[in-house]
Structure formats: structure tokens, C-alpha cells
Amino acid sequence: MIRDYIATTLGGLEGVMAQELQELGATDVEPGSRMAKFKGDVALLYKVAYTARTILRVLEPLASFQIQNERDLYWKVFDLPWRKVLGPDQTFAITGVINSRLFAHTNYPSLVVKDALCDRIRKDVGRRPDVNRDEPDIRINLHIFEDQVDISLDAVGSSMHMRGYRRYQGLAPLNEVLAAGLVRLSGWTPAIPLWDPMCGSGTILTEAAEWAIGRPSQIRRGRFGFQGWIDFEPGIWRTIKLGEKETTIPEGLELFGSDENEDVIDGARKNIRGVGLGDIIMTEVSDFFL
């Protein structure tokens, strides 16, 4: 069954994100500000959540409506079919992005949604689910702009920029999604040598190398948000994971990194070796301005 989904990204990366979605098989891709709408089946959802490099979050829309005040928000959330989303034995968390004059405090709408959700499930089954902010079974994304409310389910959980490969970060670590986006914006392909003269912890080089060998961006993630969904399809998920195999190192792949600080290069080398890319990415201590 084809469904509607939303992917979010950083400002300026909408175009390359849309291109990546199309490459992964998404249809009806419609870029917007820091996001894109797209369509696909559940297999595509799992593939995007597992492999995409230029995306921060993948969301499945649950409801969209307008409100007049907090009481209106409560009752419209209360009327949603929450028993199709989570059960009383599951935990949940709400991630809110609020920009509305209807609320004096940006955290308050999330509390209203939490109360309405719990009250509805308690009414239906006599018990309510618990909140777990760190490792919830279900993560709910709440977006309110003025009187417009959008509620979605987060298919991944924490932001997809958290790749899990960077043990050494340095003083100003580069967001991994931004690094992947910069690689794509540059027009680089594995047939072109890539040199990062101020490589820091090696993020751009790592993103380029993993993209070149076809390594999924979330391969180190232990659990995905969609695994807690009531309609989770473990067989399809298993097929997606088994089907995403790394390719051989592309012929002519040349990746170089340098930095003037020896400690920084040492940290980059630890990161690079930690993910098995020590034979692909070469590094040296060198001052770009000399």
C-alpha cells in the first residue's frame, strides 16, 4: 500500500535530499522548506530510514488540523485513533517544534497532547501508556505553526545525523547530514580524487567513503522507531537489511585529508580506522596555508 511520508533536512539541502529520495525509489517527491513530501510503500520507508544520508528525520503523517486554543488542541488530539498507533503497554515520547502565538510556553502544547493521548487510551482500555523520553517505543513528532497542527510518527527515533562512528569530535564537529549534503552539492563522484585540507575529525571524508561503498547511514543504529509501530513488518525489514550490502571499493577511489593539528589528525585516524576505512582514506599533518 502506498503511503504519504515526510523527510526533513537542513536548509539548503532540500534539492539533494529530493534527488536522494528519488534514487531510493520514492515517488511524487515535493521539496519544501527544509523538508520534502514523498510517497512509497512500507519497504521504501524502511529503506529510506536505513540508508539515506541527507535526511534528518523520516515521518509518517498522522493528523493535520487547525486549532483556536489549547482546549481545541486537547479535544482534537483526544479524537484521534490512538489505539491504532500504540497500546497501553508501550512507551512514548513527544518531540515538539512550536511557533505559535496561541501558546506562551513552547513546551506546553506537548503536555496537552500527552494528556489527551493518555486520556483517550485510558478511556478505551482502562490503562494508559507511560512516557519514556530517552528510549520510547513510539516517538511522536508535533509541529505547530500559528493555528496549524501537524502530528506525525517518527520512523527512526533520534536524528539520522547521529551515525555512531565519530568517537573523536574535536572542538567544532560538522553535522554528518551537512557533510553528506556538501559532498553531493560539490558534484563529487568516486572517480574524482577528494581532498579535504581542513578535515577535522574526518566527517566529510567518512561520509564520502561510506556513500562510495554503499554503506547504509544507519547501519550502527540498534533500533528504529518503526519497529515499535503496531503495523511493523519484520519480514520486510529483514529483507531490506539483507539487501543493502556494501559494494567493492570503486576503482580509482582516492580520499585524502589533512589538518595542521597533529592531535586532530590522530582523532580523525581513530574515527576512520574505527569504521574500517583506514585503507580507503589517507591522512597527514599539513598546514593548508603553507
Image (cartoon, rainbow, N blue to C red):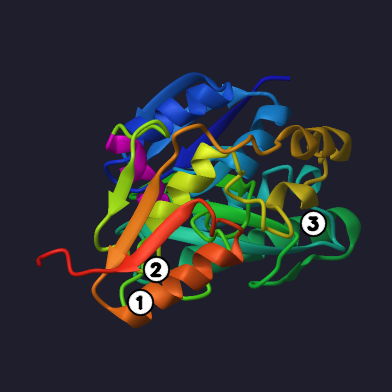
- Mark-to-mark CA distance, 1 and 3: 52 Å
For disc 3, the marked residue is 121
| 184 falls in the magenta region | yes
Q: Main SS of the magenta segment?
A: helix
Q: SS at mark 3?
A: helix
The mark that comes first in sequence, 1 or 2, is 2
Label 1, label 2: how many angstroms apart (C-alpha)? Answer: 7 Å
Q: Residue at x 33, y 50 (%)?
A: 146
Q: Residue at x 55, y 53 (%)?
A: 141
Instruction: Specify few, some or many for label 3: CA neighbours under 10 Å numbering under 14, 14-19, or 20 or more.
Output: many
Q: Position of residue 85 (x, y in %)?
A: 75, 46
The secondary structure type at the circle numbered 2 is loop
Q: Position of residue 118 (x, y in %)?
A: 73, 63
At which x and y percent is residue 105? 38, 72
What amino acid does circle 1 point to?
Answer: Val
Asked whether 236 or 171 is in front, the reply is 171
The residue at the point 38 percent across, 63 percent down is 283
- From the viewer's perspective, is 60 left or right of 28? right
> Counting residues from the N terminus, which is met first, the one under dot 2 or under dot 3?
3
Q: Which residue is mark 2?
A: 201
Per the rendered image, the range of residues in magenta is 177-186
